Image (spheres, grey):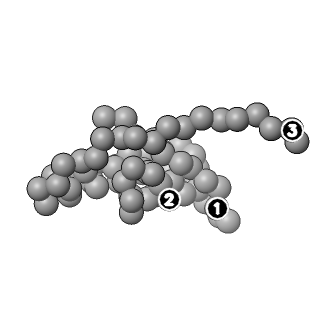
Amino acid sequence: MRYAIVIEKAAGNFSAYVPDLPGCIATGNSIKEVSKEIKEAIDFHLAGMREDGIAPPVPQSHVEYVEVAA
């Protein structure tokens, strides 16, 4: 499966979350680090759902950029 992630710059680090997996979050000191951490968080989150007998949700979020005047 392929889940969309959102990475945001925070005060002293980066944070990431998965819109299709509420509560699945990660932080890191760089984009590279938070990307690695969110992948691990997704794997952990999905494993926990499976252990609880819950089917992982089908990804439904869509990511797109729009151009706007500055």
Q: Tag 2's secondary structure?
A: strand
Q: Position of residue 35 (x, y in %)?
A: 48, 45
Residue at 43 percent across and 45 percent down: it is 36
Left or right? Give the position of 53 relative to 48: left
Q: Which residue is mark 3?
A: 69
CB of mark 2 within 8 Å of CB of mark 3?
A: no
Q: CA distance from mark 1 to mark 2?
A: 9 Å
Q: Residues within 10 Å of mark 2 (few under 14, many from 20)?
A: many
Residue at 65 percent across and 55 percent down: it is 9
Q: Which mark is residue 10?
A: 1
| Residue closest to the eye, 10 or 22 | 22
For marks 2 and 3, the one nearer the N-term is 2
The kind of residue on which mark 1 rests is Ala
**Image quadrant where one finds the C terminus:** top right
Badge count: 3
Please determine whether, in this image, residue 5 is positioned above or below residue 48. above
For marks 3 and 1, the one nearer the N-term is 1
Q: Tag 1's secondary structure?
A: loop
Q: Residues within 10 Å of mark 3 (few under 14, many from 20)?
A: few
Please determine whether, in this image, residue 67 is positioned above or below residue 39. above
Please determine whether, in this image, residue 5 is positioned above or below residue 24. above
The kind of residue on which mark 3 rests is Ala
Q: Which residue is mark 2?
A: 27
The kind of residue on which mark 2 rests is Thr
Q: Position of residue 69 (x, y in %)?
A: 86, 38
Between disc 3 and disc 1, the foreground one is 3
